[in-house]
Image: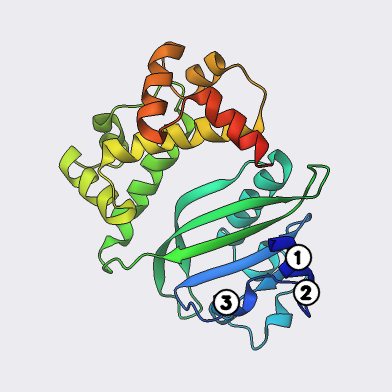
Amino acid sequence: MIHELLQQLDEPFTGEALFDHLPDIVYFIKDRSGAYLVVNTTLQQRCGRQTKAQLLGRTPCEVFRSPLGNRFQEQDQRVLKTGKPLLFQLELHVYPSREVGWCLTTKLPLKNRRGTVVGLVGVSKDLQLPDYATAEYQHVATAIEYAEQHLAEPPSIPELAAQAQMSRYQFDRRIRRVFGLNASQWLLKLRIDLAQQQLCETDAPISAIALNVGYADQSAFTRQFRKTTGMTPQDYRRTGRRGE
């Protein structure tokens, strides 16, 4: 039904008009090279451009000053080359006014019918945080990156708090403010999200995926996965493949 509806539209649906009405969200679609194809008004304004057309066909390095442009472009290339999404990345944005603000960024690969990555779509959602939080959340972002890189041997919450140069209590409060979860819940979600991605996008054995997300054996992983999602890993993989 959705295909029939979209085929009846006068122009291809990109979501641009919808996201033009959401001033706290940056929205974009990029091509295989990482150049902007679609942007919303918020992104245009924050880049200090008079029109959206001034952004189209340009890459982040051509739009943002270093090091932001370089970081955004590196993210894009990672998604485009691996086909793996970037989920809820906590990062700092600098606006034309030189004010700074924190956001959560998600980027998803766009694939053609053969499964080849041909572009990406992404959003960055503003976090309403107090001005004094800028330095503190830079440390939180460091801890989050550390956790993402060590999921095969998941760090403890005290370890992550140390990475953030905070007490466990302070770290837990910051994570709650950003993600709406306590630190333990957030770390579990990070591991389950990665497991779901690997179940749907790879043919790796479930036992290998269990190790990749920090479980010593498949049975422990299966129990936690089922408790969290309501499905066994095998059933989740089967359902995800049918939905492709």
Q: Name the residue under label 1.
A: 4
Q: How crowded is mark 3: few (under 14 residues within 10 Å), some or many (20 or more)?
A: few
Determine whether, in the image, residue 234 is placed left or right of residue 128.
right
What amino acid is at disc 3?
A: Leu
Q: Residues within 10 Å of mark 2 (few under 14, many from 20)?
A: few
Which of disc 3 and disc 2 is earlier in sequence?
A: 2
Residue farthest to the front?
1
Amino acid at circle 1: Glu
Q: In this view, does 31 lie to the left or right of 97?
A: right
The vertical placement of 77 against 133, above or below, is above
Q: Point out the image quarter for the C terminus.
A: top right
| Label 2 secondary element | loop
Residue contact at pointers 2 and 1, CB within 8 angstroms: yes
Q: SS for tag 1? A: helix
In percent of the image, x 62 and y 51: which residue is there? 108
The residue tagged 2 is 8
Q: How many marks?
A: 3
Please determine whether, in this image, residue 152 is positioned above or below residue 8: above
Instruction: Give the vertical position of 71 relative to 231 (above or below).
Output: below
Which dot marks residue 18? 3
Picture residue at 65% right of the left edge, 55% below the top: 73
Quadrant of the rendered image containing residue 126? bottom left
Q: Which residue is drawn at 53% across and 14% down?
A: 207
Q: Quadrant of residue 172?
A: top left
Which one is in front, 241 or 81? 241
Q: Can residue 91 be seen in this view?
A: yes
Q: Which of marks 1 and 3 is in front?
A: 1
Residue under the point 60% across and 16% down: 205
Secondary structure of the residue carrying tag 3 is helix
Residue 10 x/y as whole percent = 78, 80
Pinpoint residue 12: horizontal percent, then vertical percent.
76, 72
Mark 1 neighbour class, 10 Å CA radius: few under 14, some 14 to 19, many 20 or more: few
